[in-house]
Amino acid sequence: ALKNGKGEVVLRLKQGDPYIYGRGAEEFAWFAERGFKPTVLPGVTSALSAPLFANVPCTSRGVSDQVVICTGTGRKGQKPEPPVWSESKTVVFLMALHRVGELVESLVAPLSSSSVGKNGGEEGDRDEKRERKGGAGWPEDTPCAVVERASCSDQRVIRSTLEFVVQAVEAEGSRPPGLLVVGKACEVLKDRGGARWVVEEGFEGFDGLDDLVGLQSGDGGLREMAAEREAQREGAMVA
């Protein structure tokens, strides 16, 4: 459309939020530099919707008061530095399951003595960013959840802890796309009952909504709409 000069409208469709690891800002800048001002519409990032469908509230009063969204794969495949442990922190890792062992290893590794700021507060945060060379200091018993194919009929949730999640993923296999949620918020609504890990199969996020909004079969129910959407997404992935 840029080459032929016909003034055509171009739609760049992305899943989720285009500014959360979607390179949306880079594409906006590219077009702006060439005299085109894109219109960007917000989306819902899987970093927040997938935990919801897995019954994980990223924030919960008295449990988690902050959410950090991270990538598990840095530029050119580099290993990113995970955030330091805080009891009230929930961390969502995108694009991380293919290297979950390496990620968990860096999460539970102890902090180095130089990674804590001498003066605390904002200056301490700056010290940490500049001098940190150790791990992130997360306890091994920290709850976590692997959420795969969220909102699809074959959605799967593996609930575990940092101590056993790698073993769980190796035993259960991978079902991409998926993400890893880490923090006490993972056990606010559901727990493992003492097991090393538990597996939950299937998506139930739309159960009951057909009756609620009066869209029963014959009127295009939400379940039928979701099935159609999933078929379209599978077709796009194949293409």
Image: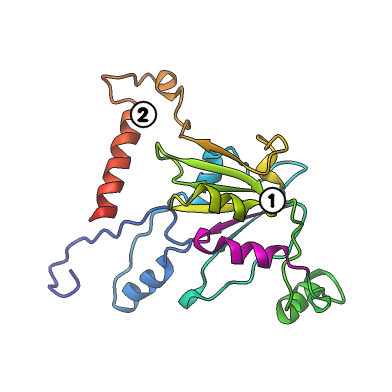
x, y percent for residue 210: 40, 22
Sequence-first tag of 1 and 2: 1
Q: Quadrant of the N terminus?
A: bottom left
As drawn, 131 above or below 145: below
- Foreground residue, 64 or 26? 64
Q: State the residue at coordinates (76%, 72%).
A: 125
Which region shows up in magenta?
89-110
Cα distance in 3D space between marks 1 and 2:
31 Å
Residue 29 picture location, percent across and down: 38, 74
> Is residue 178 or residue 198 the one in the foreground?
198
Residue type at the position of mark 1: Gly
Q: Is residue 75 left or right of residue 198?
A: left
Please state if 181 lies on the left or on the right of 13 as rendered: right
Question: Which residue occupies the foreground of this view, 141 or 75?
Answer: 141
Relative to 79, is 225 above or below? above
Instruction: Report which quarter residue 56 is drawn in.
Output: top right
Secondary element under disc 2, as helix, strand or loop, is: helix
In the image, what residue type sits under mark 2? Arg
